[in-house]
Amino acid sequence: MRRWPLPWQAAAAAAVGLALAVEALPSVLRWLRGGRRRPRREVLFFPSQVTCTEALLQAPDTRPSPAASGSPSGCQCSLPHGESSLSRLLRALLAARASLELCLFAFSSPQLGRAVQLLHQRGVRVRVVTDCDYMALNGSQIGLLRKAGIQVRHDQDLGYMHHKFAIVDKKVLITGSLNWTTQAIQNNRENVLIMEDDEYVRLFLEEFERIWEEFNPTKYTFFPQEKRGH
Amino acid sequence: MRRWPLPWQAAAAAAVGLALAVEALPSVLRWLRGGRRRPRREVLFFPSQVTCTEALLQAPDTRPSPAASGSPSGCQCSLPHGESSLSRLLRALLAARASLELCLFAFSSPQLGRAVQLLHQRGVRVRVVTDCDYMALNGSQIGLLRKAGIQVRHDQDLGYMHHKFAIVDKKVLITGSLNWTTQAIQNNRENVLIMEDDEYVRLFLEEFERIWEEFNPTKYTFFPQEKRGH
């Protein structure tokens, strides 16, 4: 049997194999790194159906597991216990294990407030940036978060801090039109994107850090100028 | 020369080639369809520097070309003529050749209004969905768009139509926190994602069509119930 040179079929097969190997390299590397799991991509639309979220918010450690995925888990209230846009948003936040950055124009939803406090209690490093005009409104969660020991910084300038995004474990970006208020969650047409995406996370984290530094409380003055427009 | 069976080297090379071909198939198909061009992904942060956008808005057909990319193009005004977040947003919209869906809570920016009218004049099919509370405010562009013959539909229900997204040629999704107002563009901390992404476009287009049908003007009643909250 001739060993060398290979017959032309083998040479052609090897050449095709090599060409395809180069083409497939990124996929292969991705596969070697973390299996074939597709990065998380989800779009939530609101208004959200009103569902019971107690099972998510009372568990000592609410990982996304079948046990917590909408089964009543003991709650006897009259609300539906299935999934909703709000429960999906809560679940994405409660997946945090190390860090959570929040950059929110308005934050008054009690459920989202409880989720953030739960993460803080679990040792997740939570940082919040918000708008000074909305943080003192009746029903705002900001005072409760601060009382619980969570770091909050706010603007003092003429424009609004109008972002509505969160970054979970520096891996997942949550962003959209939704202010974190019950009115918006239950009544408004809104969207929220949940994206496990290195590039978007990096850009939004840079924006967060810029704002975090700019809103350094040693720079606060009292009675700042009045704001303009929306 | 033995033709069959192939020596083991050739069989192995062919097997590897076949495995990699399967792995690479999506990339190869993408390459065959449209070359290796990476889908558009851009993040704009606001407030935007105030720049002159006349070169973009006066050209009869403003394709993204070097000639229109921020050179003064004859304009003698005192504003800077470079790129800004607003000029990038305008450019993404003005790339439309067939259709533009707009789903906007507030729309009062004169530059963005002119861009939309320009597209309408060029024969792009423009459809607008907006919030009834904001469309009649002083400075709103909605009346001007309607007067120009552009189809506009609005809500009549209790919640706000709070989306701020656009879909260009059913290929590119533009979405974020930014209301299309000069105040927001020039003063607020805002974000806008520009994403050439089939999946996101499909989901947001479905949301647009749902709202478009729900806001069918044959269903309008006069003096609807008062709205609640934000």
Image (tube, coloured by chain):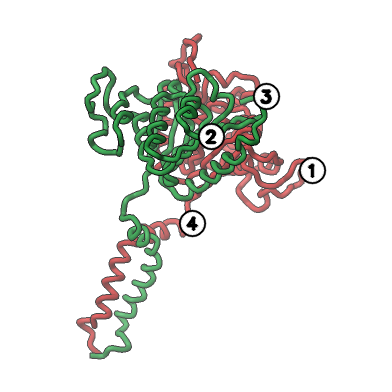
Chain colours: A red, B green
Quick one: label 4 or label 1, which is nearer the N terminus? 4
Tell me the distance, in whole angstroms, between the alpha carbons under discs 4 and 1: 36 Å
Q: Are marks 2 and 1 on the same chain?
A: no
- Callout 4 secondary element: loop
- Give the residue type that dot 1 points to: Gln
Amino acid under label 4? Arg
Residue drawn at point x = 52 percent, y = 22 percent: A131
| Res. A81 image quadrant | top right
Quadrant of residue A218 within the rendered picture: top left
User: Can residue A195 be seen here?
Assistant: yes
Question: Is B198 positioned to the left or the right of A9 in the image?
Answer: right
Q: Is residue A121 visible?
A: no
Q: Amino acid at mark 3?
A: Phe
Q: Amino acid at mark 2?
A: Val
Say which chain tag 2 marks.
B
The CA distance from mark 4 to mark 2 is: 37 Å
| Tag 4 subunit | A
Residue at the spot 46% in from the left edge and 43% down from the top edge: A171
Please tell me which residue lies in front, A65 or B56.
B56
Q: Nearer the viewer, residue B169 or A205?
A: B169
Residues beneath discs 3 and 4 located on the same chain: no
Tell me the CA gap for discs 2 and 1: 40 Å
Q: Which residue is mark 1?
A: A76
Of residue A81 and residue B201, the one placed in the foreground of this image is B201
Residue linked to disc 3? B223
The residue carrying pointer 3 sits among few (fewer than 14), some (14 to 19) or many (20 or more) residues within 10 Å by Cα, namely few
Label 3 vs label 1, nearer the camera: 3
Q: Position of residue B183 (x, y in %)?
A: 45, 20
Looking at this view, is B230 or B145 the one in front? B145
N-terminal label among 3 and 2: 2
Residue under numbered circle 2:
B129
